[in-house]
Amino acid sequence: LGEHEELHQAITCHQLFLQYQPQVDLATGRITGLEALVRWNHPAKGRVPPVNFIPLAEETGLIVPLGLWVLNEACRQARNWQDMGLTPLTIAVNVSAKQFADPDFATHVAEALERHRLQSRWLELEVTESVVMQNAERALAMMETLRGLGVRLSIDDFGSGYSSLAALKTFPFDRLKMDRSLVEALPGDKTAVAIASAVISLAQTLKLSVLAEGVETDAQMDFLRQAHCEEAQGFRFSRPVSPEEIPALLRARS
Ligand code: G
Ligand code: G
Ligand code: MN
Ligand code: NA
């Protein structure tokens, strides 16, 4: 089979699954959200990481059905956790450019929420700057429709690649996710400290909540907390884990 057919099969034959990475409130240590991250359990190759199939999915358009599966699965799991009596958490789902450009996307979001009886406030959609900049007018309309539904919108990988001040000014984001490349050299590197501090203060000025990605060490965590970064995500707190592991993590950190 060609790669394209294999990926198509992965979507239709239940070879995909989600892991969830906790997002932690730096002031309290509590878990406030989970980012859903897709994985492919390939019948011959075993586990294929998303960097090896998301780009193909984007090129071929398979990202649209794949993303729809991710959205529904994340909402189903969120409903399941709420039914188990766990404290409700925000579930963050990554959305790619082709999904965001699909005129039916907002309808798919509304349907997923309704199907799983999930309140929209528990769903967050993560998009990168390039997603909204591709067709700014259309993206703005889509974001307004999504905000009308009550879902939260975050700008993902902020500070990676070309930087992103225009997107912040133009688009109604709720949250800024600072890319891990800005976190890596904290707190030893002066330039990294200056940039991270500027990003946090920019987010505050624009009334966006701010989350640091890729936090791996106590020193990074302590610096970010002192710099009034609200939340963080990274190996310091937890790797992405299977949904079965979430209840125990929540009991330990809530
Ligand atoms: O955990 P990690 O290796 O899973 O993620 C690698 C990359 O794949 C990240 O950039 C992440 O945003 C992307 N990714 C993970 N899951 C999804 C998904 O469901 N949809 C999209 N579009 N991207 C995803
Ligand atoms: O691009 P996005 O932020 O959506 O994807 C998150 C990616 O970052 C996933 O591949 C996830 O496994 C990875 N990741 C999460 N925490 C850490 C971390 O602390 N360090 C590193 N190096 N990668 C991380
Ligand atoms: Mn993300
Ligand atoms: Na990111």
Image: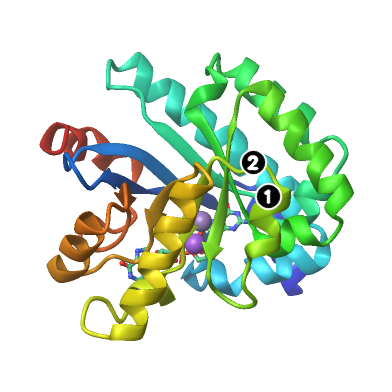
Name the residue that disc number 2 marks.
69
Q: Is residue 43 visible?
A: no
State the image coordinates of residue 41 (x, y, percent, origin top left): 49, 60
Instruction: Indicate whether 188 appears above or below 58.
Output: below
Amino acid type assigned to the residue bearing label 2 in the image? Trp
Which quarter of the picture shows residue 27? top left
Instruction: Indicate whether 77 appears above or below 82.
Output: below
Around disc 1, counting alpha carbons within 10 Å, would you say few (fewer than 14), some (14 to 19), or many (20 or more)? many
Q: Name the residue rendered at 63%, 17% in the picture.
A: 115
Q: Nearer the viewer, residue 100 or 244?
A: 100
Q: Is residue 146 visible?
A: yes
State the image coordinates of residue 199 (x, y, percent, origin top left): 45, 63
Name the residue that disc number 1 marks.
66
Residue lying furthest front in this view? 205
Amino acid type assigned to the residue bearing label 1 in the image? Leu
Q: Nearer the viewer, residue 64 or 43?
A: 64
State the image coordinates of residue 1 (x, y, percent, origin top left): 74, 72
Task: Quarter of the image for the C terminus: give it.
Answer: top left
Q: Which mark is residue 88?
A: none
